[in-house]
Amino acid sequence: SQEMLQLTEKLSVAGQLAAGIAHEIRNPITAIKGFVQLMQSGMEDKKEYLDIMTSEIERIEQILSELLMLAKPQVSKFVRKDISLLLDQVVTLLSTQAILNDVEIVKDFEATMAFIECDENQIKQVFINYIKNAIDAMPSGGRLIIRTEKIDSKQMSISFCDNGVGMPEEVLAKLGQPFFTTKEKGTGLGFMISRKIIENHAGDVKIMSKVNNGTTIQVILPVEQGK
Ligand code: ADP
């Protein structure tokens, strides 16, 4: 029956995720175990091993903290927020990182205020993910344009447009699968979690990308009608 089919699908997604988590966490643990054994054998350069172990432990921490985002009660606190204000705060938070990477962030916000009903921390987390990804995509600097636009009386669009490396078909096809990353220190969880949060806010995410040209991530969210 339809219900049975849905149940099986859900279990297999959970199973897939569990297998991914186990794999991602086993790798750094195996590495740490190896270095502990080397250090037990003595005469080794302990400082270097401790540094590697610390970075592997940090990797596990990062994976776990991103996974906990998924486990949190979905959309806990819905409050009315001015979207420009939220974006301003996130941009300020990441401005040092942008400057260090020679990335100029341009804010192209619609003049009239637009409000959304959102869980502030979750929505900020989504914007942080997209901005960080854009910065990562411009290793020798570039420009990120953040644009807000009203689509109609019910919806608005927030787009993150970078002129970075872009994504080939095979990356686009896998984007959003848990643990898919092309980065050495990536977790491959950002896109999946961001999409889930946007969907929990009755919104949608669209991706446009061209290799060597750049990427635009467009978030569509329902707007709060003026009260
Ligand atoms: P992570 O950032 O940890 O790798 P994500 O799920 O956020 O995880 O992203 C998955 C992959 O999608 C990245 O490793 C990168 O290859 C690609 N990607 C995401 N955003 C962009 C972007 N703006 N430009 C180019 N590639 C991107």
Image (spheres, grey):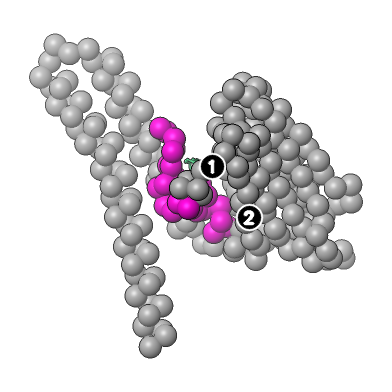
- In-front residue for pair 19/115: 19
114 sits to left or right of 54: right
Image spot of residue 120 (x, y percent): 66, 52
Tell me: residue 113, above or below residue 163.
below
- Which residue is found at the position 61% from the left and 27% from the top? 97
- Which residue is found at the position 22% from the left and 12% from the top? 45
Image spot of residue 122 (x, y percent): 60, 52
Q: Which residues are magenta?
A: 173-197
Earlier along the polypeptide chain: callout 1 or callout 2? Answer: 1
- Which residue is found at the position 82% from the left and 56% from the top? 150
Can you identify the residue that label 1 sits on?
Answer: 167
Tell me: residue 31, above or below residue 1.
above
206 sits to left or right of 29: right
Please give the label number shown on residue 206: 2
Image spot of residue 215 (x, y percent): 62, 42
User: Which quadrant of the figure contains the C terminus?
Assistant: bottom right
Tell me: residue 87, above or below residue 177.
above
Helix, strand or loop for disc 1 = loop
Q: Residues within 10 Å of mark 2 (few under 14, many from 20)?
A: few
Residue 121 visible in the snapshot: no
| Quarter residue 17 falls in | bottom left
Does 135 lie within the magenta span?
A: no
Does 188 lie within the magenta span?
A: yes
Residue type for callout 2: Lys
Q: Ligand 1: does it lie within 8 Å of the C-beta at label 1? A: yes
Q: Residues within 10 Å of mark 1 (few under 14, many from 20)?
A: some
Mark 1 vs mark 2: in front:
1
- In-front residue for pair 24/35: 24
Residue type for callout 1: Met
Helix, strand or loop for disc 2 = strand
